[in-house]
Image (cartoon, rainbow, N blue to C red):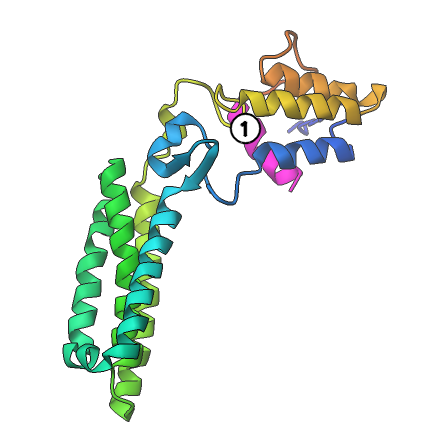
């Protein structure tokens, strides 16, 4: 059997510090959004002018904050009311508020996602307050606390698996290209390429021309064959990490 000869052509400038900077910035996402801010991600974002926030995180933490403040306030002025309500009532309330989260991967309406995430945010303090504060401080109470923490963790992992398995990626059906070389992200790409060009030497301009071609800003053929843009993007994130 003849050995297979594999050769890789490295684009001039692809290994430069400027190229690494470019790829890091190209894939960088706002810590407030956690998603691309393209229009196809509208159901995942809350937009306030030029600021985009992750809908899920914003609503989740808002619900947690409101519920935590209310529980802390009631604990301060009327702990007897919470104590009379009891552990199992608060846990039942928390479980009931958690249930809409299970439908969220299948019902991607923005209004429903806002409500489901707010409910989940309220559910978490209710569950933890009922289990960790109201349970008696006895051997049986300590065992129940351990059972609660294990159940909470397993439920969290199972929910994450459900979301990863069934939540549709908006990029899959977007008609405007592949992120980050898509239509809505083009202004950012143009700006980054302009800075990249100023940071590279004449000998390293091959990489600049390459990414400009991928972005549709330059006509021409690359010196290497790209099987698909998706393959390049996946590889770039690994190579330049």
In the image, 14: left or right of 138? Answer: right
Residue 72 x %, y %: 32, 72
Q: Is any part of residue 108 visible from this angle?
A: no
Q: Position of residue 217 (x, y in %)?
A: 62, 12
Q: Nearer the viewer, residue 23 or 126?
A: 126
Question: In this orientation, does residue 62 appear?
Answer: yes
In the picture, measured across the screen, residue 139 lies left or right of residue 176, that is left
Q: Is residue 146 above or below residue 18?
A: below
Q: Position of residue 103 (x, y in %)?
A: 21, 46
Most foreground residue, 226 or 39? 39
Q: Which residues are magenta?
A: 227-241
The residue pinned by badge 1 equals 231
Vertical order, 59 against 3 (above or below): below
Q: Nearer the viewer, residue 91 or 152?
A: 91
Q: Answer whether residue 191 is magenta in the image.
A: no
Identity of the residue drawn at 41% across and 35% down = 48
Which residue is rendered at x = 20% and y = 70% of the image? 91
User: Which quadrant would residue 219 be assigned to in this image?
Assistant: top right
Query: Looking at the image, is 19 positioned above or below residue 86?
Result: above
């Amino acid at each position: 059997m003849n050995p297979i000869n594999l050769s890789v052509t490295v684009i001039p400038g692809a290994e430069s510090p400027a190229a690494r900077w470019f790829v890091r910035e190209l894939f960088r996402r706002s810590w407030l959004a956690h998603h691309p801010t393209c229009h196809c991600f509208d159901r995942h974002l809350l937009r306030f002018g030029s600021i985009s926030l992750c809908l899920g995180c914003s609503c989740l933490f808002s619900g947690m904050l409101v519920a935590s403040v209310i529980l802390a306030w009631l604990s301060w002025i009327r702990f007897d009311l919470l104590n009379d309500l009891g552990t199992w009532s608060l846990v039942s309330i928390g479980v009931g508020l958690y249930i809409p989260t299970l439908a969220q991967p299948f019902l991607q309406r923005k209004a429903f996602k806002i409500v489901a995430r707010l409910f989940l945010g309220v559910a978490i303090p209710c569950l933890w307050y009922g289990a960790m504060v109201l349970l008696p401080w006895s051997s049986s109470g300590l065992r129940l606390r351990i059972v609660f923490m294990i159940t909470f963790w397993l439920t969290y992992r199972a929910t994450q698996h459900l979301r990863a398995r069934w939540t549709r990626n908006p990029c899959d059906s977007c008609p405007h290209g592949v992120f980050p070389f898509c239509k809505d992200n083009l202004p950012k790409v143009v700006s980054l390429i302009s800075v990249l060009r100023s940071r590279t030497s004449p000998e390293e301009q091959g990489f600049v021309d390459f990414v400009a071609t991928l972005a549709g800003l330059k006509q021409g053929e690359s010196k290497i064959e790209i099987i698909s843009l998706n393959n390049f993007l996946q590889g770039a994130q690994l190579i330049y990490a």
